[in-house]
Amino acid sequence: MASAKVEICGVNTAKLQVLTEKQKIELLKKMKAGDPNAREELIKGNLRLVLSVIQRFTNRGENPDDLFQVGCIGLMKAIDHFDINQGVRFSTYGVPMIVGEIRRYLRDNNAIRVSRSLRDTAYKAMQAKERMTASLSREPTIDELSKELGRPREEVVLALGSVVEPVSLYEPVFSDGGDTIYVMDQVGDHNDDNNWLDEIALKQALLDLNNREKKILALRFFKGKTQMEVAQEIGISQAQVSRLEKAALGKIKRNL
């Protein structure tokens, strides 16, 4: 049976050329040597790679032609910057470049507009987070990131939140072969008559905690500190913090 003809940007995907890794390396060498046709052959020979990447983003309601064109830009950047002396497969380098270009496009064309300065702060914060995670052997706290960037804590939180891709209410979260559960199925109704009873019960449960337990939970879950950081601030061991935290959460669960 003949395969169905599927066109993207006027390209028949059923007839896309596929290059071997050896052919890619040879064409890259020719391109570096100044052969003008080698780059064109490399682009044509890697369009299936772009096609496979854009399939990850098909559930976002974006036009496939637009994603394919943006993916091709990422492919061309990968071809122009790939170092054949690194000893890695071209796809290993190319796929992240294509994905990055598509994600950048989706961010910049998001219906929720984010200012350039806020995006710049977010990118700097993410880079700083990677550096500090490597040097500290743990993820830095927001306060540490704020100090490293010399920016207010609230600005860092807002910036990092601005580049998080929104999740569709129709995004599936679980399926066992039967009915699929979507994000919207897990969104609560704030008008539920039982909510105010839950709030009263939670407040009462918190009142039953002693001051040390309240402080530990506040530092852990409201300020985002690690157990080690809480231990240093309070002046006890990390093991004690872990035990007290577990006991406090147990009290709340029992009271609820």
Image (cartoon, rainbow, N blue to C red):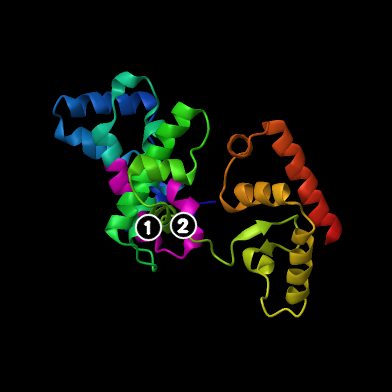
Residue 202 or residue 69, whichever sits in front: 202
Element under disc 2: loop
Residue 144 or residue 49, whichever sits in front: 144
Q: Is residue 84 above or below residue 225?
A: above
What span is colored magenta in the figure? 53-76
Mark 2: amino acid: Glu
Q: Is residue 155 above or below residue 27?
A: below
Q: Report the quarter where the C terminus lies.
A: bottom right
* Residue 241 x/y as whole percent: 70, 38
Determine which residue is flagged by label 2. Answer: 165
- Principal secondary structure, stretch drawn in magenta: helix
Residue 196: in magenta span: no
Mark 1: amino acid: Arg
Q: Residue at x 28, y 58 (%)?
A: 116
Q: Earlier in the sequence, mark 2 or mark 1?
A: 1
Determine which residue is flagged by label 1. Answer: 107
